[in-house]
Image (spheres, rainbow, N blue to C red):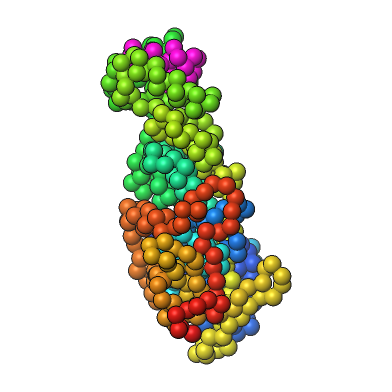
Amino acid sequence: MTDPTGSLGLTGLTGPPGPTTALHTDRYELTMLDAAHGGGTIDRPCVFELFGRRLPEGRRYAVAAGLDRALDAIERFRFDDDTLAALQRDRIVREPTLAWLAGYRFEGDVWALPEGEIANPNVPVLTVHATFGEAVLLETVLLSTLNHDTAVASAAARMVAAADGRMLLEFGSRRAHEAAAVHAARAAYVAGFDATSNLEAGRRYGIPTAGTSAHAFTMVHDDELMAFRAQVAALGVGTTLLVDTYDVRQGLRNAVAAAGPDLAAVRIDCGDPVAEAHHARALLDELGAPGTRIVVSGDLDEHRIAACRGAPIDVFGAGTAVVTGSGSPTAGFVYKLVARARSPYGDLEPVAKAGGAKATVGGWKAAARRFDGDTATHDVLHPWGTPPPTSSRPLQIPVVARGERIHRPDLDAVRDHHRRAIAELPPTALALDPGQPALPTVPLEAHDAGGVR
């Protein structure tokens, strides 16, 4: 076999199953590494923190999501033969650095907020303790994963709050990149959505899937009643019939005529959802189908869902506002060096960037959430390795130890953690109007720490 790396004779490490994530990165990660390798700082112990400086405009909280995918990415961050050949061909790094990359395997430690946790400004969502070379390479893949999934989960959580216990279906696949659509479905499910239309998300993550037909199915038939009868013949009376292709009122009559009074549900995808739902409920009851549920969809966001409180709507279908920037603005996470040693065996020293709004706070930090009874009041930062303040819950947990992943909760456990975290928030946090962060973040020295210093 021809050696793809030419005269170097390199063979990259084999990682876990699946494609390598090593090139899911920016070029400057590799050029920094190359310079650090030549300059002798590649093996310096370091601490990087991934956090957000602020919440998106008007948001009162964010939901940390994507940790499981981020840890998968770390495990698969290997420089295989094809990757090394590409770096050599494009002269991204010099040959000594290529040799270093051929043996790359992350061997550091990682702590993180559990997935589904509430994420507040300046609280480390993820902390990496490793050599500079090991840690710096992970910046882009960690940020792209956690920024995306946290944005979707945060938008989805607001819709869950607005739905007030009613079922939510995620319909956003056609509004996103095909890979992002799968990850968005998972993030929405973490935040409390009940099902997704995306079959790959169902296959990969075990998320319940939902969906029956679109307007095209109705229109390909000679008339609506024929279409409904064909759907019921195929799927049974437990199906959902889309009744707004032509005239909603006649659609409702045709639906009951085709399926009978035991029809599971009808869906309305246009018009004023409140008015349409009231009309539909009255007509379904009149037609002898009081148990038929009403599903509404069509450009729903948390505000339109909240406006439907009191309407006889059983299920909401939301798509665009869940998976795109219009409803899920980026979490704005950054990945910053906060401590480093002067030698491979030296003590860690705080480092910080100056520069106005982008200045950072140096030092390895832990975070804890303080409570008044069962209600969270604020988050507190304290030096790593010191006890958290009294009446608080530590936020970070170990997820990777000496390069080995030690955290693999199933998706049900992640959803349960999110439900508990949301339940701790003060009632004002769930308001949909713009406001300040529900849980301020303060450094320990600025707060009564219960005697801890």
Name which residue lies at 57% across and 47% down.
433
Name which residue lies at 60% across and 43% down.
326
Residue situated in front as seen by the camera: 132 or 194: 194
Residue 41 in view here: yes
Residue situated in front as seen by the camera: 81 or 408: 408
Tell me the quarter of the picture where residue 339 sits.
bottom right
From the viewer's perspective, is residue 268 above or below residue 57?
A: above
What x and y, as percent, mark residue 163? 44, 40
- Magenta stretch holds residue 248: yes
The stretch in magenta equals 242-259
What x and y, as percent, mark residue 449? 47, 79
202 displayed left or right of 42:
left
277 displayed left or right of 176:
left
What x and y, as percent, mark residue 113? 44, 65
Tell me the quarter of the picture where residue 8 sits.
bottom right
Residue situated in front as seen by the camera: 331 or 44: 331
From the viewer's perspective, is residue 67 above or below residue 262?
A: below
